[in-house]
Amino acid sequence: MPTFTRNASAKWNGTGKEGKGWVAGESKALDTQYNWNNRFGEGSGTNPEELVAAAHAACFTMKLAFVLDGMGATAEELNTTSKVTTDKAPGDWTITKIHIVTTGKVPGIDQAKFQEAAENAKANCPISRALKAEMTVDAKLV
């Protein structure tokens, strides 16, 4: 299978607290504002942690469907919530916990097999793995 790259971008103007930003994906399915109040208060728009949670819930759920397929079971329906917890850790804000809650309607499979499939999806979906990935940065002052 070929390697592929997906892109998203963000723009920010102003200070961290009073500034405002915009985040968009290349597909244009994501194209919205974000700011300090969205992240730490009750503003409208999204925030980076919500985007991580959304990506993780979507990726985990699709991977779970593939794992179930491999076990000979087909999900009629899977529903997942990814709860991302951010705390002020020593030094700076940090995502400290991700809790996945998933339910499934999967004929012909028992709870133990469903839990086994979920653990596999948690360990192996690309977003779970990305949270441990090598990261590089190229910064240029203009």
Image: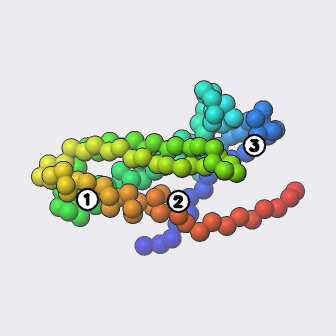
Label ID, residue 12: 3
Please give the label number shown on residue 116. 1
> In terms of secondary structure, where does tag 3 sit?
strand
Q: Residue 85, percent across and down? A: 52, 43
Q: How is the image coloured?
A: rainbow
Residue on which disc 2 sits: 131
Q: How many marks?
A: 3
Q: Residue at x 47, y 57 (%)?
A: 127
Do callouts 1 and 2 mark residues in contact (Cβ within 8 Å)? no
Which image quadrant: the N terminus?
bottom left
Name the foreground residue: 2 vs 69.
69
Q: Is residue 44 visible?
A: yes
- Residue 133: x %, y % from top left: 55, 66
Q: CA distance from mark 3 to mark 2?
A: 24 Å
Of badges 1 and 3, the one in the foreground is: 1
Q: Secondary structure at mark 1?
A: helix
Q: Left or right: 90 with respect to 85?
A: right
Q: Is residue 137 above or below residue 101?
A: below
Which quadrant of the view contains residue 63?
A: bottom left
Q: Residues within 10 Å of mark 1 (few under 14, many from 20)?
A: some
Residue 91, given in percent of the width and then of the height, sits at 70, 51
Q: Residue at x 53, y 59 (%)?
A: 131
Within 10 Å of disc 3 (Cα), the crowding (few <14, some 14-19, many 20+) is some
Q: Amino acid at mark 3?
A: Trp
Helix, strand or loop at disc 2? loop
Residue at 42% across, 53% down: 59
Given the image, on which type of amino acid does mark 1 rest?
Glu
> How many angstroms separate mark 1 from mark 3 (CA)?
42 Å
Question: Which mark is first along the chain, 2 or 1?
Answer: 1
Position of 34 relative to 128 (above/below): above
